[in-house]
Amino acid sequence: MIELKGIHKAFGKNQVLKGVDIKIEKGDVVVIIGPSGSGKTTLLRCLNFLEKADDGELTIGETHVDLKHSSKQDILKVRRQTAMVFQSYNLFNNKTAIGNVMEGLVTGRKVPKKEAEEISKKVLDKVGLSDKYDFYPCHLSGGQQQRVGIARALALNPEVILFDEPTSALDPELVGDVLGVMKKVAEEGITMIVVTHEMSFAYDIASKVIFMEGGVIVEQGTPKDIFTNAKEERTKKFLKRIVPEWSYTI
Ligand SMILES: Nc1ncnc2c1ncn2[C@@H]1O[C@H](COP(=O)(O)OP(=O)(O)OP(=O)(O)O)[C@@H](O)[C@H]1O
Ligand SMILES: [Mg+2]
């Protein structure tokens, strides 16, 4: 179980997160949607301490952290249980696909090289890259690079994988492959928090959809609740803009 309570974060005078509460059960796929600047990325980054929240509480499995007074130990514990997939892949360009996946295991987790190699091959096979172990990022398509990013997250066997717009840098014809891999990961029961504008993916896969605006959660519910029966005007307005062809449903 993952729980966020009262998450606050400001950059200078810009109060970006104004008290966010989210509860996630094991195996849930939570999709976060919302306009640019609403704080979606900041929320994910606070969740794995890429950014330090000003206030709030975070529970991941057995780990409970008061974010205002977090220790180095807390940060390490949380980071061990989370992995992030970035919009821009964030791969090491001087490492091969397998090198990228092994890095976190060998350097971060101190897994022996041989074992790390075996784990890395397994996860690369899972994302459909069994023939690309030794390819450098520059010789992989965007979709393949992002699948390396997902393999790297899977290799760490985290409690939750955080995806920040994983397909928005991709050419449209490559989006499907990455979403397909994410669907497969979801079906394995891995807990996922996904920021995305891919509404049909959200509709199919999400256990819960959260609409954020202005640093707060405006509304949350099942995909059906949110996409066909949104209660808040702000949610309806956003959805009409993002998926005009759905406007008949709201
Ligand atoms: N490191 C930072 N320093 C200062 N301001 C920041 C920083 N990161 C984010 N912000 C500000 O926080 C606000 C929320 O940004 P955030 O990236 O979380 O939004 P978002 O919902 O992910 O938007 P998008 O959909 O465009 O990715 C914005 O006003 C942004 O300018
Ligand atoms: Mg963002």
Image (cartoon, helix red, strand yellow):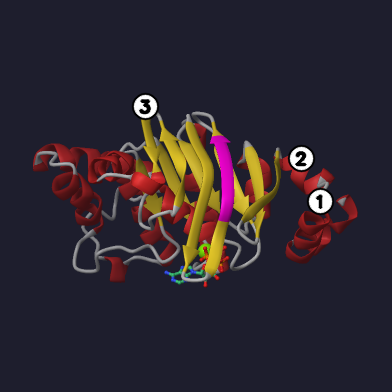
Q: Which residue is mark 1?
A: 232
Asked if the residue under mark 1 is in contact with the one under mark 2, i.e. CB atoms within 8 Å, the reply is no
Q: What amino acid is found at the position of numbered circle 3 in the picture?
A: Glu
Find numbered disc 3 in the image and state the secondary structure of the residue it sits on: loop
Crowding at mark 2 (Cα within 10 Å: few <14, some 14-19, many 20+): some
Report the disc number at residue 201: none
Verify whether residue 228 appears in magenta: no
Query: Range of the magenta residues?
Result: 18-23
Q: What amino acid is found at the position of numbered circle 2 in the picture?
A: Lys
Residue 117 drawn above or below residue 250: above
Q: Which residue is mark 3?
A: 62
Q: Nearer the viewer, residue 192 or 124?
A: 192
Whether residue 118 is visible, yes or no, is yes
Find numbered disc 2 in the image and state the secondary structure of the residue it sits on: helix
Q: What amino acid is found at the position of numbered circle 1 in the picture?
A: Glu
Q: Residue at x 42, y 55 (%)?
A: 45
What x and y, as percent, mark residue 20? 57, 48
Whole-angstrom CA distance, mark 3 to mark 2, is: 32 Å
Which dot, 3 or 2, sits closer to the camera?
A: 3
Verify whether residue 21 appears in magenta: yes
